[in-house]
Amino acid sequence: EANNNPDFKVRVRFGGSEVILQSNSGNVRFNNVSLSGFTGDFEEPGEEGDLIHYWVFDESLPNNKALETINPVYTVTEGGRLAYSAAVSPYPPENSGTDGILDRVNDPTMINYISSGNSNISYLDSEMRGIRARNPSLVDGKESYLIFDLPSTGYEALAFRFAAKRTGTGQETLIVEYSTSREDTVWSRDGLNQSEFALFETYKTVDIRFKEIADVNNNRDLKVRVRFGGSEEIRTSNSGNVRFNNFSLSGFPGNFEEPEDADNLIHYWVFDDDLPNNTPLEFIDATYSELNSGMIEYISAISPYPPADGTAGILDRVNDPTMINYFPSGNNNITFSESAMRGLRARNPSLTEHGESALVIHLPTTGFIPESFSFAASRTGSGQEKLILSYSVSEGNTEWIDDDLEQNMYDLFLNYHRITIPVEDIHLAENNPDFKIRIRFGGSEEIREGDSGNVRFNNFALRGEEIQSVSPPELPSEVKLEQNFPNPFNPVTVINFALPSRTDVTLSVYDAIGRRVATLVDEQLNPGMHTVTFDGSQLSSGVYLYRLNAGGVSMVLKMTLIK
């Protein structure tokens, strides 16, 4: 371990009789101290792989606050996260105390600082900070630890590194474990080059190599846990802490086979030279579509659109490709080539007096069960900071909701990363010719209203399964009105009804004393199932009635709005 080691030290102590050692006379003299060795074939820092996830801490991290989760400042795969599990309970503490918390500390270090992971910013002590895990780290048998979600999709030969130190009464060691399973998290140290690290009162590198562990490669569920070790007396005390900085996961791109279901594409967009250049874009047909009707529509915050001149607020082609979320099966089995691929760019401003910009992705699913919608996205330095997602399943007037989304807001980074939205649980998304997803831009108004900066997109994919043995739907035998879903609701709900034949239809909503508050349908409709969305955002909480009149039949049901 002394070879190629930036932390190698030698200590020379003095021995002999205590009488001489303790006397005030005499000395030892030194001269011509040397270290020699042979040049070795070691990996250079630049040969340690590509950066996958990176955390560096500065003043953007809240101060004087118990921290729970911290997103990476750089990531190339979706889902990187640092989370803190505290030994103290409740957490954060109710009394604003500091015992057992994770918080920001003014203690930076250059060790493992990677400028390319921090927008190419040169290291500067005055701008950097660190994080501090305070004692106690063991309370009534419960211990504190850091957990890192480190998806490694597309990468192998991984290395996880960071800088760490302790104060005089801080925890004495770190214990590092990993897990590769999503269903049942099982922590292991098997195959690690080292799993326990002594802490010192100056920052040292903690270097964990996964080279011999195949299961961590190309694994979206990879996690690493960092626990605190040492004497129970120190771990249960209320003084001392461990300080961390500059966490990184790096690795090499691997040649991995796509999952068996990777080509279950319903719609797919990839962008190349076929897309017009230097042109404001409004509609983009899918590169691949099972239904020949997938389309991206751009709604701009500027008016008129396209503008007579200028590029502010437009969607256009950009020379910025990425392999992330690239499916050859959706592009005539063409192998990815940077020189042949391009991307989309949504330019600021995305918010004006005319409204806000958005991408509307038309994703008809007739005959299919959709499972996931994914794409690659990045931002420039002054580009929009977040994406906000919603969806529509209604025909006619489009109503945007996010009720069934696990998450509707996603952070953007300066590098491409994958965003995946599970859609299998969206009510009525299955077998729906009107299914759409809308992507809006979030963050500070100052950025959204600015004329510089943009967000870049690539490789949109809707994946799912074909519905087996789909028969033409039988026409209903009678008029039927279904209970709204969800119920109770806030503020949007969906109403379904069935018609056995073409007829005049009215669907109205009434309050508890019989006043009509909304007319949802007043027209002639074809036979079959129909879906209408009701938005009660302008109404107060309470019980409402909705009445369907069709073909000489009148039906009434109750629904409850709770705000």
Image (cartoon, helix red, strand yellow):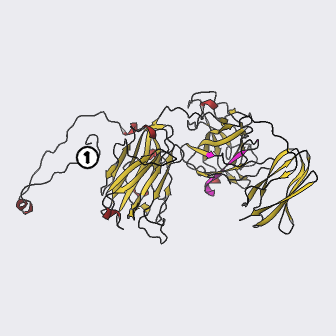
Among the 4 quarters of the image, the one containing residue 281: top right
Residue 118, relative to residue 545: is it above or below?
Answer: above
Residue 558, relative to residue 258: is it above or below?
Answer: below
Callout 1 amino acid: Phe
Residue 546, relative to residue 270: is it above or below?
Answer: below
Residue 191: horizontal and vertical position, in percent?
A: 37, 41
- How many marks do you count on the picture? 1
Residue 280: horizontal and vertical position, in percent?
A: 70, 40
Residue 437 is covered by the magenta coloring: yes
**Left/right of residue 437 with respect to residue 319 in the rendered view:** right
Viewer-closest of 501 and 201: 501
Residue 484 is covered by the magenta coloring: no
Q: Mark yes or no: residue 269 visible.
A: no
Quarter in which the C terminus is drawn? bottom right
Q: Circle 1 — which element?
A: loop
Q: Which residues are magenta?
A: 421-447
Among the 4 quarters of the image, the one containing residue 203: bottom left
**Left/right of residue 261 with respect to residue 240 in the rendered view:** right
**Left/right of residue 463 with respect to residue 142 in the rendered view:** right
Measuring 9% from the left and 53% from the top, which residue is drawn there? 28
Residue 406: horizontal and vertical position, in percent?
A: 62, 52
Residue at the spot of label 1 = 8
**Left/right of residue 491 with respect to residue 528 in the rendered view:** left
Quarter in which the N terminus is drawn? top left
Viewer-closest of 310 and 282: 282
Q: Residues within 10 Å of mark 1 (few under 14, many from 20)?
A: few
Q: Mark yes or no: residue 64 visible.
A: yes
Residue 407: horizontal and vertical position, in percent?
A: 61, 52
Taking the view exactly as shown, the residue that stands out farthest to the right is: 552
Viewer-closest of 105 and 392: 392
